[in-house]
Amino acid sequence: MGLDIGDKRIGVAISDSLKISANALTVIQRSDFKSETSILKKIITEHQVETIIAGLPKNMDGTIGDQAKSVQAYCDKLEEELDVPILLWDERLSSKTAEEVLISADVKRKNRKKMIDKVAAAVILQSYLDCHN
């Protein structure tokens, strides 16, 4: 499972059973940790998730900024709650790539906003899968 963790939303993507391709699944609106983990637990059970790949928003120069530190802390807490290993994966330019994918698919601007996070999660997960296959 791939996650694009933001302040307002969490994009979620799932790989196929052969772990070859990533597919955008859903967007979870950030509210409270308990609600977020409840939704993630359902997805983990339903899709038999073994590992979570979470995007780490490094700065363009590769350094770890405040947003990346926030994602790291959230993932540490999440890993304890979900009891599934979480790997952090460099997500630089994933949102830009996701937007380009949606534009090339001729998705209207108002619809792109609703889909960008789950497509970014798919971009992150696909990058990981491509590197490890």
Image: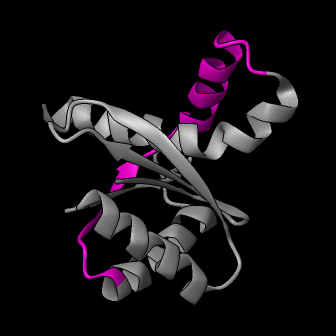
Question: Where is 78 relative to 14, above or below?
Answer: below
In this rendering, position of residue 83 left or right of residue 71: left
Q: Position of residue 58 (x, y in %)?
A: 51, 51
In this rendering, position of residue 118 left or right of residue 62: right
Q: Looking at the image, which residue sits at the far front?
A: 46
Front-most of residues 26 and 56? 26
Q: Residue at x 56, y 77 (%)?
A: 36
Q: Residue at x 64, y 13 (%)?
A: 105
Task: Identify the magenta region.
Answer: 82-107
Q: Residue at x 25, y 82 (%)?
A: 83
Q: Residue at x 24, y 36 (%)?
A: 129
In this rendering, position of residue 39 left or right of residue 53: right
Question: Where is 100 relative to 51, above or below?
Answer: above
Question: Where is 116 relative to 57, above or below?
Answer: above
Front-most of residues 32 and 132? 32
Q: Is residue 95 magenta?
A: yes
Front-most of residues 96 and 121? 121
